[in-house]
Amino acid sequence: MAQQRKLAEYHRKRNFDETSEPEGRVERTRPSRLQFVIQKHAASSLHFDFRLELDGVMKSWAVPKGPSLDPTVKRLAIQVEDHPNAYNTFEGTIPEGEYGGGTVMLWDRGTYTAASSATDPVADLRNGYASGELSFALHGERLHGAWTLIRTRRGAQKQPQWLLVKRRDDDAEPGSDVVTEYETSVATGRTMEEIASGKRRKSG
Ligand code: MN
């Protein structure tokens, strides 16, 4: 049960009688299928939650401006509490007054791998995370290719600031704006307004 302590902050911040977010649990790691998800979240301020599975939980960062495919653009990514893997399918509205109150959209999802061809990719990712330079490749529905998260010296101890940067490769698109290119849910095709109003999945 000690493993479940990883989600203590996540659980402490939420009242599961009020929010439809999942309680979740720490999962067993399947190194060949590490998940990633990006959720667009219209809370008190709009941001994108960037989550990478590591050691049974989703390591999580709030990225105010969202990802950029332009390798010259560095996007601030504020680390927040680990989330359960079960959060990866959450889309909906967190009631006002609850922690993170507002609309959540599944903006991208898929798997990710270590950027290097290390013999132990999970150890490589774990070391990158601990050292503050985490390089990885996304295999999403919208985002692909190599990225790096770099920890800066800024930010509170519990909310370290990182920078999310697209590496130069075939998936880089200098000058592009991927956040405005995709304004609907990758899961249901809904806009933020449609999710907020409780409209069901679009047909067709
Ligand atoms: Mn959020």
Image: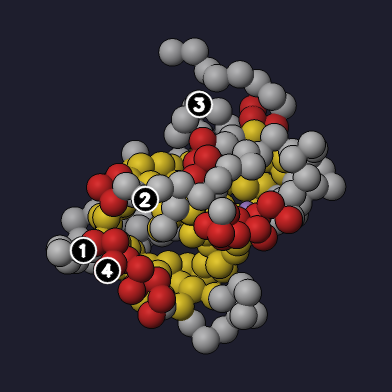
Question: Could you say where residue 123 lies in the image, as x and y percent from the top left?
Answer: 28, 67
Could you tell me how far apart the alpha carbons at marks 1 and 2 are, in whole angstroms?
A: 13 Å
Could you tell me how far apart the alpha carbons at marks 4 and 1 are, in whole angstroms?
A: 6 Å
Amino acid carrying label 2: it is Thr
The C terminus - image quarter:
top left
Amino acid carrying label 4: it is Asp
Can you name the residue that lies furthest to the bottom here? 153
Mark 3 or mark 2: name the one nearer the start of the chain: 2
Instruction: Provide the residue designation for mark 4.
Output: 124
Amino acid carrying label 3: it is Thr
Could you tell me how far apart the alpha carbons at marks 3 and 2 are, in whole angstroms?
A: 27 Å
Mark 3 or mark 1: name the one nearer the start of the chain: 1
| Placement of 120 over or under 203, stated as above or below | below
Residue 118 appearing in the image: yes
Query: For numbered disc 3, what is the local secondary structure?
Result: loop
Instruction: Provide the residue designation for mark 1.
Output: 120
Query: For numbered disc 4, what is the local secondary structure?
Result: helix
Q: Nearer the viewer, mark 4 or mark 3?
A: 4
Residue 6's tag is none
Question: Could you say where residue 106 lies in the image, as x and y percent from the top left?
Answer: 51, 39
Instruction: Provide the residue designation for mark 2.
Output: 29
Could you tell me how far apart the alpha carbons at marks 4 and 3 are, in whole angstroms?
A: 34 Å
Instruction: Provide the residue designation for mark 3.
Output: 188
Could you tell me how far apart the alpha carbons at marks 3 and 1 are, in whole angstroms?
A: 35 Å
